[in-house]
Amino acid sequence: MAQGVAQGVAQGKAETLLTMLGRRFGEPSAETISRIRTAGVETLDRWILRFVDASSLDEIFADR
């Protein structure tokens, strides 16, 4: 059951990030959508925080 909850949380965060990206940068590519939908909660949290200050998708997804 815990795994199902974690999966639901990740899906919710992914959809939120996709909505935010779409509003600021336009419709994400299929590759970006796939990357987001398969990411874990920690990665999604990192990307969501980066979104706040990012001026491009590259800044959000940069490997740092």
Image: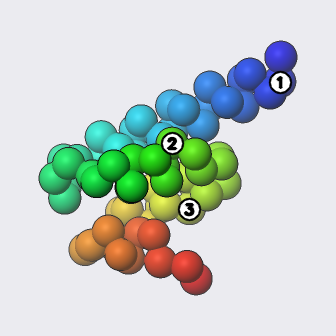
Q: Secondary structure at mark 1?
A: helix
Residue 21 coordinates in the image, percent (x, y):
28, 52
Query: What is the C-alpha distance between the residues marked 3 and 2?
Result: 14 Å
Q: Mark 1 sits on what residue?
A: 2
Q: Earlier in the sequence, mark 2 or mark 1?
A: 1
Residue 56 coordinates in the image, percent (x, y):
27, 72
Q: Locate residue 26 relative to residue 46 in the image: left or right.
A: left
Any part of residue 53 in sight? no
- Note whether 43 is above or below 14 in the view shown: below
Residue 30, labelled with which disc?
Answer: none
What residue is shown at x 39% (from left), y 55% (from top)?
31
Which of pointers 2 and 1 indicates the residue nearer the eye?
2
Residue 37, labelled with which disc?
Answer: 2
What residue is shown at x 27% (from left), y 52% (from top)?
28
What residue is shown at x 74% (from left), y 22% (from top)?
4
Q: Mark 3 sits on what residue?
A: 46
Q: Residues within 10 Å of mark 3 (few under 14, many from 20)?
A: few
Q: Locate residue 52 relative to residue 12 in the image: left or right.
A: left
Amino acid of disc 1: Ala
Q: Quadrant of the N terminus?
A: top right
Q: Secondary structure at mark 3?
A: helix
